Amino acid sequence: MSIAASSLAPDLAQLSRDLRAWARELGFAEIGIADTGLAAEETRLAAWLEAGRHGEMDYMARHGVRRARPAELVPGTIRVISARLDYLPMRARDPAAVLRNSRKAYVSRYALGRDYHRVLRGKLQALADRMTAAVGAFRYRVFTDSAPVLEVALAAKAGLGWRGKHTLLLTREAGSFFFLGEIYTDLPLPVSTRQSEHCGSCHACIDACPTGAIVGPYELDARRCISYLTIELKGSIPESLRPLIGNRVYGCDDCQLVCPWNKFAQVSGESDLAVRNGLDDADLIALFAWTEEEFARRMEGSAIRRIGYERWLRNLAVGLGNAACSEDIVAALERRVDDPSPLVREHVAWALARQRRPPAPHRAARAAASLDP
């Protein structure tokens, strides 16, 4: 029998207050508590899957509506504790400056440090352990983007913010640069008050999306999203989308970077989330020169490692193809024209064709003029 069903049930209101204090001690910015009613989100999810907007993310369809039914995923669940952990690393290079320099590799800010799954899971488990020490054994399960969980919908219900038009959670206090994690539990904790929405008529995120993946307010077509293309997609990136990716080699932050609420984004004090391997301002050619062994060593403990070396080179080849034309980029690409991977070879060939394309007329005219006596 769980403690929730025991005659010796704890003071849940006090436990809820204690939870918030413990969460702050563990480094969480905020927590909230939600019930499990997600009927409206279930309808929305079903329509999104029916439209095929999940692309090759088969696990989204495989789990289907279980994502919207917490008690089916973890029997006995009646509450979800949702937690927010800010992730912007200290002393990272300005993202806009990296995006402007076509020779640099842009890595989504969340992936610059240690794998967030490990960091967040450890903190959530520590929070659950504090709960157990305080009230005794109870049923629970910790989630960190590791199972069919509608984390944005649950976080919104838990009062941590509202779903922005880019589909990410937004809060007035910290924008959207944060991780979300959950503890499913059978404890009937008091639920948090839901926040109102504050996007208004703003559509900056929709306008800024490089590939038009935000097809309307609160509607994302993952098949066009750069995060999907560079992380989730296992095969060839569609040629029509490659030029739009620019130098984004792992993920994309554009919709967040333009969001007015992110002027309040909080820098993380977590040492595990600090920049590793200079990935906040890395050179495309330098990264492209890594051997497979070097990739494995440098990306040990990083979220990037899970895409593997082959897709890492694929993404870098696209970035090099989109860079300003130069002989050293051509030379770097030529060194991989016979790469063992057909996927890499295909993207290298595309990139070389881009680098070797004839100069635009205005550039050719300037070049000819510079040769005049």
Image (tube, rainbow, N blue to C red):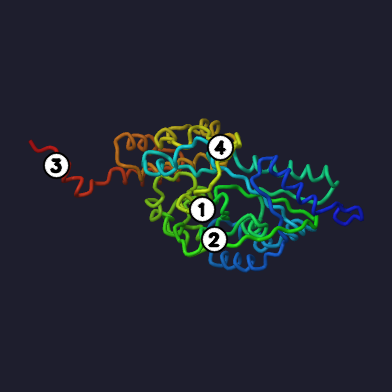
For the residues labelled 4 and 1, the Cα–Cα distance comes to: 23 Å
The answer to whether one can see residue 62 in this image is no
**Quarter of the rendering containing residue 349:** top left
> In the rendered view, does 223 fall on the left or right side of 40?
left
Q: Do the residues bearing badges 4 and 2 touch, measured as CB atoms within 8 Å? A: no
Q: Which residue is mark 4?
A: 113
Q: Which residue shows up at 72% across the image and 51% down it?
A: 183
Element type where label 2 sits in the image: loop
For the residues labelled 3 and 2, the Cα–Cα distance comes to: 54 Å
The answer to whether one can see residue 103 in this image is yes
Figure check: 277 above or below 168: above
Q: Amino acid at mark 4?
A: Gly
Task: Please tell me which of labels 4 and 2 falls first in the chain.
Answer: 4
Task: Please tell me which of labels 4 and 3 falls first in the chain.
Answer: 4
Q: Do the residues bearing badges 1 and 2 touch, measured as CB atoms within 8 Å? A: yes
Q: Do the residues bearing badges 1 and 3 touch, measured as CB atoms within 8 Å? A: no
For the residues labelled 4 and 3, the Cα–Cα distance comes to: 47 Å
Q: Which residue is mark 1?
A: 261
Q: Position of residue 271 (x, y in %)?
A: 60, 34
Q: Which residue is mark 3?
A: 368
Residue 278: give its label.
none
Dot 4 crowding, Cα within 10 Å, few <14, some 14–19, many 20+: many
Dot 1 crowding, Cα within 10 Å, few <14, some 14–19, many 20+: some
Q: Amino acid at mark 2?
A: His
